[in-house]
Amino acid sequence: MAGRLEQMLDIEEWEMLQRSVAKVTGMAIVTVNYKGIPITEHSCCNRFCQKVRQNETLSSYCQKCDARGGVEAARNNSPYIYQCYFSIMDIAIPLIVNQQYVGAVMAGQVRLPVGEDESNIEKIFTPCSSQKLESVKKKFAAEYEEIPILSMDKIQTISMMLFYMCNYTIRETMHKEQTIHMYETFFSKQIPFYQNGFGNSYEKEKMEETIEESMDEKTEVEDNFPKTNNRILLQAFEYIHGHKHSIPSMAELAELCHVSPSYFSRLFTKDVGESYSHFISRLRVEWAKGLLESTDCSVQEISDKLGFSDSGYFIKTFKKHVGVTPAFYRTYCETQQI
């Protein structure tokens, strides 16, 4: 189950959706795995919670709140509305796959209007004395007052909207994965017939076109960096090429080139024509295609060589760019050499 949620979701696209929903609802939103550990950025996190989460001890308390909130939501497979240890309203939306709890969407960081009854709302975690918590609230009083105020009716309405949206997304993702798996299983069984010249189905032709287009797009592995005369980007490309086993972040490259991350990002997108995250993902897939065609390295070994966090994420990324899994791509390439 570990890593399952990260493998299922396209984190970049999920974060775009998450940011949009956060802005519309006025709530902060973050997606966590089943341990309560964030797998996305914290969208629209208010200043008070940012201050709190910068403290290592208090941040660990926040993670425990997220973990317990997610478990409570998963227990009944429904949104769970509760108060954090600072009496701030939060919602846990469970993400369940094949009856297994894999994570949660945590929303909230809002307060109830003064006078609204909150006696039935559980405070899920109290880590220390109320005196110590009050001292923190006093220290960041201005930031605390900025926390949005929403009525309980509004919070409940948003919680159900998030619940339906997340459930729909997870179901569609699972259906897509199952369909692709069935599709690949079918065609992998047909490959021996293709070798002998049999089978001219429309599906076979479309699958071949997809893979062949991907093969045609692959340039020489060592030469597939964009042409540029910019010394900053040339330095960055040189570093990336020399560190295929790791994934340098944009911040690391900006520091290496002695510029700010925001400037590096603008320069990269303007000169290369795509974001750094998309470029580095596509580049590593190009390198992987070369290794699949020219070596006997296993998928796991290639994943490790190119610095992917795990082979499941590598397979998901490869399939996103190429349309098939690495194993299927290698099998197809081998049949074309016979």
Image (cartoon, rainbow, N blue to C red):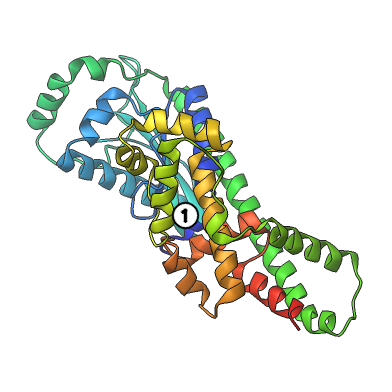
Q: How many marks?
A: 1
Which residue appears farthest toward the front when viewing the image? Answer: 229
Residue at left offset 64%, top offset 60%? 177
- Dot 1 amino acid type: Glu
The quarter of the image holding the C terminus is: bottom right
In this image, 143 relative to 174: left or right?
Answer: left
Q: Position of residue 223 (x, y in %)?
A: 56, 55
* Residue 87 in sight in this render: no
The quarter of the image holding the N terminus is: bottom left
The residue tagged with tag 1: helix, strand or loop?
helix
The one nearer the camera, 263 or 102, is 263
Q: Position of residue 68 (x, y in %)?
A: 31, 49
The one nearer the camera, 69 or 257, is 257
> What is the quadrant of residue 318 in the picture?
bottom right
Q: Position of residue 285 (x, y in %)?
A: 56, 59
The one nearer the camera, 266 or 100, is 266
Crowding around mark 1 (Cα neighbors within 10 Å: few <14, some 14 to 19, many 20+) is some
Above or below 234: residue 208 = below
The residue that label 1 is drawn on is: 6
Residue at left offset 30%, top offset 14%? 114
In this image, 260 relative to 20: left or right?
Answer: left
Residue at left offset 42%, top offset 60%? 244
In this image, 268 relative to 111: left or right?
Answer: right
The one nearer the camera, 185 or 127, is 185
* Residue 299 in sight in this render: yes
